[in-house]
Image: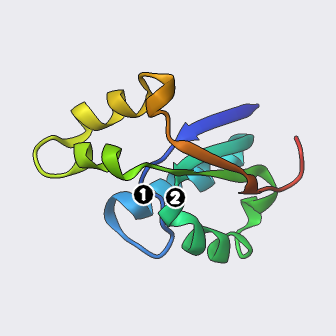
């Protein structure tokens, strides 16, 4: 099985939403080859922790940099309702995806 997950908050060193994102990513990898799209600011803690987990060969991360003008939508009461639709609505507003340095395991 191949799985694609979007996880804006994913950090193995944090609790609450970021910690839950990390846990879900690992659980999905137990079901099949998993690709997780997350924000680029999560890269360092993920790559540090990834070496120590048994699911590392089935778990890949793609890090997305959200442009500064788009981050306006996630602050205060604007929240996800304005942020996510604007992030993926048009070609001009799509975030930059850094695929050249994504974490990779075995191809499955």
Q: Is residue 75 left or right of residue 92?
A: left
Question: What number is the disc on residue 20?
Answer: 1
Q: Residues within 10 Å of mark 2 (few under 14, many from 20)?
A: some
* Coloring scheme used: rainbow
Residue 49 at x, y = what percent?
63, 74
Give whichever of 99, 47 is nearer the camera: 99
Between 17 and 86, the one lying in front of the other is 86
Tell me what residue is drawn at x 42 percent, y 49 percent.
67
Secondary structure under badge 2? helix
Above or below: residue 90 compared with residue 108: above
Camera-nearest residue between 75 and 16: 75
Q: Please provide percent x and percent y for residue 16.
A: 32, 63
Q: Which residue is mark 2?
A: 23
The extreme right residue here reads 107
Classify the position of the C terminus by image quarter.
top right
Task: Establish if 106 lies above or below 83.
Answer: below
- Quadrant position of the N terminus in the picture: top right
Q: Tell me the tag on residue 80.
A: none
Q: Is residue 36 above or below residue 45?
A: above
Answer with the quarter of the image where residue 28 lies.
top right
Disc 2 from disc 1: Cα separation: 5 Å
Residue 98 image position (x, y, % from top left): 66, 51
Dot 1 lies on which element? Answer: helix
């Amino acid at each position: 099985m191949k799985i694609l997950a979007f996880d804006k908050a994913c950090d193995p060193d944090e609790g609450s939403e970021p910690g839950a994102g990390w846990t879900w990513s690992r659980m999905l990898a137990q079901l099949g080859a998993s690709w997780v799209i997350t924000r680029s600011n999560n890269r360092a803690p993920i790559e540090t922790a990834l070496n120590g987990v048994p699911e590392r060969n089935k778990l890949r991360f793609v890090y997305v940099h959200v442009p500064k003008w788009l981050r306006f939508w996630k602050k205060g009461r604007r929240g996800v309702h304005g942020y996510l639709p604007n992030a993926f609505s048009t070609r001009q507003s799509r975030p930059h995806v850094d695929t050249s340095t994504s974490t990779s395991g075995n191809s499955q």
